[in-house]
């Protein structure tokens, strides 16, 4: 699922909600640096931000960059096996008007039970 947020000019590969918390995930097969760049745009609205990588292994550089940014890092080795490499830190630098706009968009989307 790609969620386009009006007037943000950005989209995310996966957006998950639980209660009031919003998590954005950027998924890549190999280009973790591109995912890192894309994640910066989500800092305005997401409580948690993650990168999911479908690589054979996770480089020390990817792990260190995710940790330094406060992003989670998920390694999906196969389509049915995912592992947390780095757990995300809660983002406290939300831009409230943009977050409110996202909340309105999310409320208009049906949720799968």
Image (cartoon, rainbow, N blue to C red):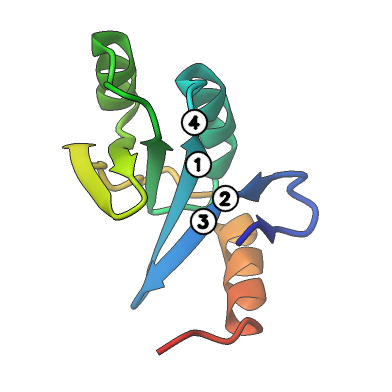
Q: Earlier in the sequence, mark 1 or mark 3?
A: 3
Q: Is residue 81 visible?
A: yes
For the point 38% across and 54% down, which residue is it?
47
Q: Secondary structure at mark 1?
A: strand
Sequence-first tag of 1 and 2: 2
> Which residue position is annotated with label 1?
26
In the picture provided, is 6 more to the left or to the right than 49?
Answer: right
- Do the numbered discs 2 and 4 sit on residues whose CB atoms are within 8 Å? no
Q: Residue furthest top?
A: 61
Direction from residue 12 to residue 6 in the image, left or right: right
> Pointer 2: what residue?
13
**Which residue is under mark 3?**
14
Near-viewer residue (39 or 61)? 61
**Vertical order, 99 against 92 (above or below):** below
- CB atoms at circles 3 and 4 under 8 Å apart? no
Q: Dot 3: within a 10 Å radius of its alpha carbon, few (fewer than 14), some, or many (20 or more) residues?
A: some
Q: What separation in Å lies between label 1 and label 2 (alpha carbons)?
A: 5 Å
Q: Nearer the viewer, mark 2 or mark 4?
A: 4
Task: Estimate the spatial distance between the alpha carbons at disc 2 and disc 3, rounded to whole Å.
Answer: 4 Å
Residue in view at x 28 percent, y 48 percent: 90
Residue 103, placed above or below residue 4: below
Q: Position of residue 25 (x, y in %)?
A: 46, 47
Q: Are marks 2 and 3 in contact (CB under 8 Å)?
A: yes
Q: How many marks?
A: 4
Q: Nearer the viewer, mark 3 or mark 4?
A: 4
**Residue at 58% across, 87% down:** 110
Residue highlighted by disc 4? 29
Callout 1 touching callout 3 (CB < 8 Å): no
State whether residue 86 appears in this view.
no
Circles 1 and 4: CB atoms closer than 8 Å:
no
Residue 19: image location, x then y, percent: 34, 78
In the displayed structure, 33 sits above or below 103; it is above
């Amino acid at each position: 699922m790609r969620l386009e947020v009006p007037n943000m000019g950005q989209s995310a590969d996966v957006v998950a909600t639980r209660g009031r918390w919003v998590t954005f995930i950027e998924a890549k097969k190999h280009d973790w640096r591109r995912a890192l760049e894309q994640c910066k745009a989500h800092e305005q609205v997401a409580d948690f931000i993650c990168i999911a990588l479908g690589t054979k292994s996770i480089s020390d550089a990817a792990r260190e960059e995710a940790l330094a940014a406060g992003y989670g890092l998920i390694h999906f080795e196969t389509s049915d096996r995912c592992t947390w490499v780095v757990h995300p830190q809660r983002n406290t630098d939300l831009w409230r008007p943009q977050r409110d706009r996202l909340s309105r968009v999310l409320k208009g989307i049906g949720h799968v039970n």
